[in-house]
Image: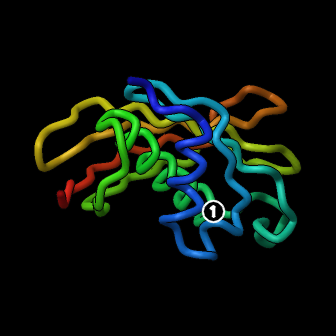
Amino acid sequence: MTMTTAEADKILSANFAPWVLALGLSIEAVEDRRAMLRMPWSDQLAREGGALSGQALMAAADTATVIAVSAARGAYGPMTTVQQSTSFQRAVIGSDVLIEAVVTKLGRRMAFADIVMTEEGSGEIAARASTVYALLV
């Protein structure tokens, strides 16, 4: 059974620290092994020069992975980041970012995902990430 966006929203609100929630992430879509989140533009997330901070993008990628892995497993379960690698390709200024996380391998103890972060206005890729998660239960 596919997870609904309402179920994914509950995972987001119930399992993340207040500073992650302050990113304003919302669930756009969720499928069996995929989650699409939106991070709205905020001047509070911009660094000197007006570009969105890399830390915000990395936190959004990490969060999107949790939702995608939960969708792939059919429900949320405790998990932790083992590795995240992010490559930044272009600055984002004044636009929302769409974060698409796709689970590429789901094992009993580990999950792997690829994440693409796209500037909504231009459709250009702002960053790519790959993550590895340990599944604790």
For image coordinates 41% across by 31% down, the residue present is 102
Q: For the C terminus, which image quadrant? A: bottom left
Image quadrant assignment for residue 136: bottom left
For image coordinates 88% across by 49% down, the residue present is 94
Residue bearing the label numbered 1: 56
The residue lying toward the viewer, choosing from 120 and 36, is 36
96 vs 125: above or below: below
Image quadrant assignment for residue 135: bottom left
Query: Residue 82: percent from the left, percent from the top?
Result: 25, 61
Whether residue 120 sits left or right of residue 5 in the image: it is right
For image coordinates 84% across by 44% down, the residue present is 95
Query: Residue 21: percent from the left, percent from the top?
Result: 65, 66
79 vs 100: above or below: below
Whether residue 110 sits left or right of residue 46 in the image: it is left
110 vs 137: above or below: above
**What colouring does the structure picture have?**
rainbow
The residue lying toward the viewer, choosing from 110 and 127, is 110
34 vs 82: above or below: above
Q: Answer few, some or many: residues within 10 Å of disc 1's Cα (few below 14, many 20 plus, some between 14 and 19).
A: some
* SS at mark 1 in the image: helix
Q: For the N terminus, which image quadrant? A: top left
Name the amino acid type tagged 1: Ala
For image coordinates 42% across by 39% down, the residue present is 68
